[in-house]
Image (tube, rainbow, N blue to C red):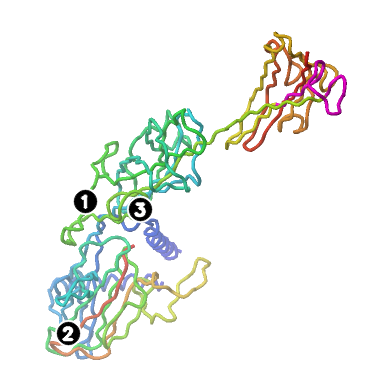
Amino acid sequence: MHNGKFFMGIMSAVLILGLAPGAWAAGTPSGTSVANKATVNYDVGGIGQTLIESSPTGNSTAGLGNGTNTTFLVDTKLNLTVTTTDVAAVSVVPGSTNQVLTFTVTNTGNAIQDVSLSALDAAGHEPFGLTDNFNASNVRIFVESGATPGYQAGEDTATYIDELAADATKTVYIVSDIPLAQVNNDAAAYDLVAQVAAGGGVGVHGADITTDDSLVADNPATVQRVFADAAGSNDALHDGKHSSASAYKVVTAHLSITKTSAVIWDPVNNAVNPKAIPGARVEYTISVSNTGNASATNVAVADSIATEVGNGTLAFYANGYGAGQGIEVTAPNINGGAAKALTNVGSDDEGDFGVTTANTVTVTGITVAAGQSATVKFVVTVQ
Amino acid sequence: MKARLSVVLSVVFLALWAGLAFAEQKGSIELTAVAEKEAVVTDAHGKAVKKLVPAGKVLPGDEIVYSVLYKHVGDKPAENVVIDNPIPEHMVYVDGSAEGRDAAITFSVDGGKTYRPAKGLTVKGPDGKPRPATAADYTGVRWTLKKPLKPRESGRVSFRARLK
């Protein structure tokens, strides 16, 4: 029984030893000493001799422990990988603040590093097929604290990555404001550039590492630094940096409004080829269409006939679409998109005449999605 | 009982080795182990050639050429010469890389307890059933010289391994 337990103990020890190196996807840690020793066994005159171990310069002294390991030190691989996690341009509205581009920064080297971060204008190599034509304002960079996923103004305040372990990844945000003057389809592209910096001091931003030891002679006894990074969106191969680009795209509603009129009835011809003679009814059609890329909500249409009523040329016809219903609205979000007659009084539906504003047709609560349109109609009588 | 016996035997062997080491006994073979990297250098004719240089800058993924140089420094031929080199910790054997003239090459997957030719080596898979061993499973390389080594004769055996 005792022997069995002992054997089990050895088995689990071997398992742990066997698995541990696999945990280092970024490779054996910098500074690890890798030792090698060979042995030779032989006979002389048919008699087994004592084994001999190797040494870096040659050993012939027989016996265990008389050889010396041939060793080298694992050097420091400096390698950062920056990737944007934005799968498309980030849609922004003019005048919005704290708009976020999202990136990940991974230490694909084999030692703990600090990472300095900067944002560069990506004009000329924009992602997502865009053309950069404006600059966002108040451009800042913050590192995700890990407390709450996504950018949180109060939480994510670090401006560099402190002590990024080999294989570890941090989420980094470019946070900026969009000028109110921007119009639909404007784009601003940015590169997030990560620069490897010295690690080792918790809470201390280490100095940027701008040169490696590629011009220094190899030395098996010292830990040397080697840039192994790829070229990113705005940096070169093996320069201690890596970068990736993302972009803001202005997406806003763009409303255009047209108004047409048609005589629909006169007291002589009635509905057949009616003319604009006194007593005739004229229907006004106000069309609102959204040629932008975002939905416009809470659209209100107001049309005043105060001047015409004042000078006695026109009067509002109160029953154009039913008794007491002088207004008709056709909007995608009202009545399933079908025409709806509205009463002239206020509060009971989306429209009124003369309640919100004197001698004015008012219709509120219209939503016009991108590419859609809505119409408001009312009828006046020629005096 | 068998296990206990082998433990006792190991202790005896260790004591024996320790005693011999203390005597500083000079053996008949001098053994040198070197670790080198393959570098591309320009030769005198301006041609790019591969050359082995000392393993100075070594990063994860780099390949190291481990050579073992043996030289007979005694006066009587050495028979049944067997050179063992465990795969160093942090390294993975590169498949098919072991070389050695007039030597039979075998591999161990059990930390040097047994050695077999590459073909037919098996290890226990995750399901507990044996599966063919891959280069990553090797724990050691063994070269068995096919001829006795005569005085002043020397040679070189080698293998490659990649830093994890």
Q: State yes or no: discs 1 and 3 in contact (Cβ < 8 Å).
A: no
Residue A281 placement, left or right of A190: right
Host chain of mark 2: B
- What span is in magenta? A265-285
Gap in angstroms between the C-alphas marked 3 and 2: 43 Å
Q: Badge 3: few (under 14), some or many (20 or more) residues near its Cα, within 10 Å? A: many
Image quadrant where one finds the C terminus of chain A: top right
Gap in angstroms between the C-alphas marked 2 and 1: 44 Å
Host chain of mark 1: A
Q: Label 1 belongs to which residue? A: A211
Q: Amino acid at mark 3?
A: Thr
On screen, A341 above or below B42? above
On screen, B2 above or below A102? below
Q: Amino acid at mark 2?
A: Ser
Mark positioned earlier in the residue sequence (1 or 3): 3
- Assign a secondary structure to mark 3: loop
The reply to the same-chain question for discs 3 and 2 is no
Q: Nearer the viewer, residue A173 or A51?
A: A173
On whether residue A281 falls in the magenta region, the answer is yes
Q: Nearer the viewer, residue B81 or A102?
A: A102
Q: Label 2 belongs to which residue? A: B154
Q: Label 3 belongs to which residue? A: A108
Q: Quadrant of residue A154?
A: top left
Main SS, magenta region, reads: loop
